[in-house]
């Protein structure tokens, strides 16, 4: 996530696997929380600032138990785009079959490995790669070169639908994830395959397979995703 200040500077917060950015009006909550690595006091700006300053301040804090996250700053939004975002692929929420096929259609890598490559498509992690491939009925170990035009189109649509659905449900809380108010996401209950290895497919009831693709645990239906 990116936070731009009033003077134009940008703070980038990378959550990693367990990072959280939380908001509170009580400093005691921050003091009692563990694994806090940075705390910011949020000041009101514009008309009424003096009155706002008289109220209890708002604190924004970053905690990360597993230390996979991080913080970095850029002097401007333009610098952020030039030095960081320019290295990322298409936004997952804007994915379409044509763009995906043009960018990686000649890759000999497994299609799931392609989806996990942030230089190809940004915002698709392990959970939503499995979910999108399930919705598109594509086996995760298939080579990208083997996908037909119609399959690329299905995959693009599935990625967008999967991400939008997860956002609408507040994200997937497996262990650590919380939103800024400390609430858990509920998208986990809607997972088609992720975390359900060995259980029945929700479509055909066949046992879901589990394997490793691109060093990540992967779940799929051998019947529906051929």
Image: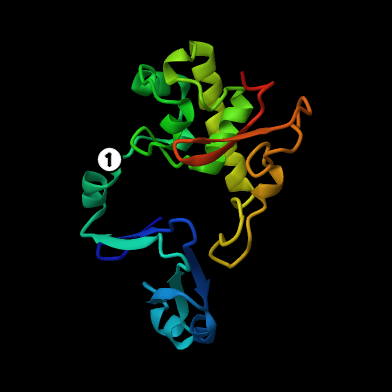
Measuring from the top left, give residue 43's x and y in whole percent: 39, 77
Q: In the figure, residue 206 lies in which quadrant?
A: top right
**Tag 1 secondary structure:** helix
Q: Nearer the viewer, residue 70 or 53?
A: 70
Q: Nearer the viewer, residue 103 or 170?
A: 103
Q: Is residue 148 above or below residue 126?
A: above
Q: Is residue 147 above or below residue 214?
A: above
Measuring from the top left, give residue 198's x and y in whole percent: 71, 38
Q: Disc 1 marks which residue?
A: 87
Quarter of the image with the N terminus in it = bottom left
Q: In the figure, residue 114 lies in which quadrant?
A: top left
The residue at 66%/37% (across/down) is 193
Q: How is the image coloured?
A: rainbow
Measuring from the top left, give residue 90's x and y in whole percent: 38, 33
Residue found farthest to the front: 211
The residue at 65%/44% (across/down) is 195
Measuring from the top left, give residue 96's x and y in whole percent: 46, 24
Q: Nearer the viewer, residue 158 or 125?
A: 125
Q: Is residue 67 above or below residue 218?
A: below
Q: Is residue 120 left or right of residue 59?
A: left
Residue found farthest to the right: 205
The residue at 59%/67% (across/down) is 182
The residue at 40%/25% (across/down) is 109
Quarter of the image with the C terminus in it = top right
Mark 1 neighbour class, 10 Å CA radius: few under 14, some 14 to 19, many 20 or more: few
Q: Nearer the viewer, residue 108 or 102?
A: 108
């Amino acid at each position: 996530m990116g936070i731009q200040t009033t003077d134009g500077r940008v703070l980038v917060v990378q959550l990693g696997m367990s990072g959280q950015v939380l908001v509170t009006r009580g400093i005691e909550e921050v003091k009692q929380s563990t694994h806090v690595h940075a705390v910011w006091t949020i000041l009101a700006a514009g008309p009424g600032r003096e009155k706002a300053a008289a109220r209890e301040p708002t604190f924004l804090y970053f905690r990360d138990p597993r230390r996979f996250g991080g913080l970095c700053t850029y002097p401007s939004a333009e610098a952020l785009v030039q030095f960081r975002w320019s290295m990322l692929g298409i936004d997952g929420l804007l994915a379409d079959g044509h763009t995906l096929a043009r960018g990686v259609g000649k890759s000999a890598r497994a299609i799931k490995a392609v989806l996990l490559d942030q230089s190809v498509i940004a915002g698709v992690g392990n959970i939503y790669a499995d979910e999108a491939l399930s919705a598109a009925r594509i086996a995760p170990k298939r080579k990208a070169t083997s996908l037909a035009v119609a399959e690329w189109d299905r995959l693009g649509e599935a990625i967008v639908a999967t991400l939008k659905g997860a956002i609408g449900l507040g994200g997937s809380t497996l262990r650590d994830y919380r939103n800024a108010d400390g609430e858990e996401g509920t998208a986990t209950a809607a997972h088609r395959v992720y975390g359900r290895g060995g259980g029945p497919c929700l479509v055909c009831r066949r046992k879901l397979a589990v394997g490793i693709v691109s060093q990540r645990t992967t779940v799929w239906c051998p019947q529906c995703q051929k």
